Amino acid sequence: MSSSRSLPDRADVLIVGGGVMGVSIAFHLAECGVRDAILLESNSLGSGSTCKAAGGIRAQFSDPLNVELGKRNLEAFRRFSVRPGGEIDLHQVGYLFLLDDPASVASFEQSVAMQNRLGVPSRIITPAKACALSPLIDTTGLIAAAYSPGYGYCTPESVVLGYATAARRYGARLVPHCPVLGIKKGPYEGFDVRTATGTIFAPTVICAAGAWSKQVGQWVGVNLPVTPLRRQLVITEPIDDLPANLPMTIDVRSTLYFHLEGRGVLIGMSDPDEQPGFNLNWSPHWLAKLCEMISRRAPGLMDIGVAGGWAGLYEVTPDHNALIGEANAGGRFLYATGFSGHGFLMAPAVGEVMRDIYLNVSPPGPTYPRERLPVCRQQQPP
């Protein structure tokens, strides 16, 4: 692990935040030859929101840009063992959305048509077919479901490890346990970034601090309207006879979701009564709500014991869309934050986007399709 004891007093690029977004950005920059890049993380790499994520990967969105990004991300996860390298336990078991009201069905039908035009093989299916795919569900009240094969989930910690290892191999310096304490305008074009072990000057700072991004933006006078919001999940004890291809299943009305996790099932659900903040305590009140929804939609899980669980943080914006871009704040201040629950699955493509922004490359089109990305000659590790 890199130590903060001998940090230099200058870097070309300084990345704040060592979750999946930060290490993806570090990798994509270093791969293209940006050698003097330092990433600072206040704790262990991936220990913030990333290690608490459910690991879902999909392209079933209602916005064409997110669909295109989702497609690119799946391709990156499929090839992860080759580039950047590492096993991420990818399960391409499909994504299944359960629909119980006509308005939701109509909305998903429109989205599925758009997704199909963009090459995503999603489709509307009957409740009976949904139950055949995900036999834990009770179809009472369901009208239809939206299903897309090929997508699924993987292990977030392994993705962080893969990106971090490759970024270091290409020359980036990743420094865990080194919190950023403040940022201010430097004596020249750039920023003085203060840490517990000293100050680093960098002409470019990239904020990938997730739920903690608002404070980073305030230090340089940039408004990043990101609000931390607790999300909780549990993992059951082992369950016999579950199909190995059980899809990621989401009940749209309640937001209840589940997928296999080892021999058990990972289960989560948002809480409409959750208040913003950095609270990471597990809530008995939430658990009671979760049990109520499980009894309605997946009653077979009610007889299974809970083996563990945790709480993590979403980084929510007012319109639930991500903040990606650059601001002139006395130096180059780039940011990729506010993914509102989709940061993990967006990390590969957004790492590429942030690389292009830093390199001042403007791809011809808002969707950054892979085949039209500018050629970036990949450097060999030193």
Image: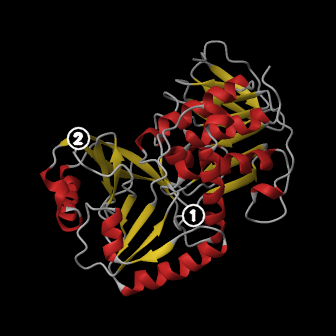
Badge 2: how crowded within 10 Å, few (<14), some, or many (20+)? some
- Residue depicted at x 16% and y 44%: 305
* Residue under label 1: 321
* Residue under label 2: 238
- Looking at the image, is 274 positioned above or below residue 51? below
For the image, the number of numbered tags is 2
- Per the image, label 1 sits on a secondary structure element best described as loop
Badge 1: how crowded within 10 Å, few (<14), some, or many (20+)? some
Q: Amino acid at mark 2?
A: Pro
Query: Residue 287: image x %, image y %?
Result: 20, 53
Q: Quadrant of residue 98?
A: bottom left
Query: Residue 296: image x %, image y %?
Result: 19, 68
Q: Earlier in the sequence, mark 1 or mark 2?
A: 2
Query: Residue 82: image x %, image y %?
Result: 67, 35
Outermost residue on the left side: it is 303
Q: Amino acid at mark 1?
A: Asn
- Looking at the image, is 322 positioned above or below residue 313? below
Q: Nearer the viewer, residue 10 or 64?
A: 64
Please state, as top left, top right, bottom left or bottom right, where the N terminus lies in the image: top right
> Do the residues bearing badges 1 and 2 touch, measured as CB atoms within 8 Å?
no
Q: Is residue 89 visible?
A: yes
Q: Quadrant of residue 376?
A: top right
Q: Is residue 184 visible?
A: no
Q: Nearer the viewer, residue 303 or 29?
A: 303
Query: Residue 3: image x %, image y %?
Result: 59, 15
Q: Quadrant of residue 292?
A: bottom left
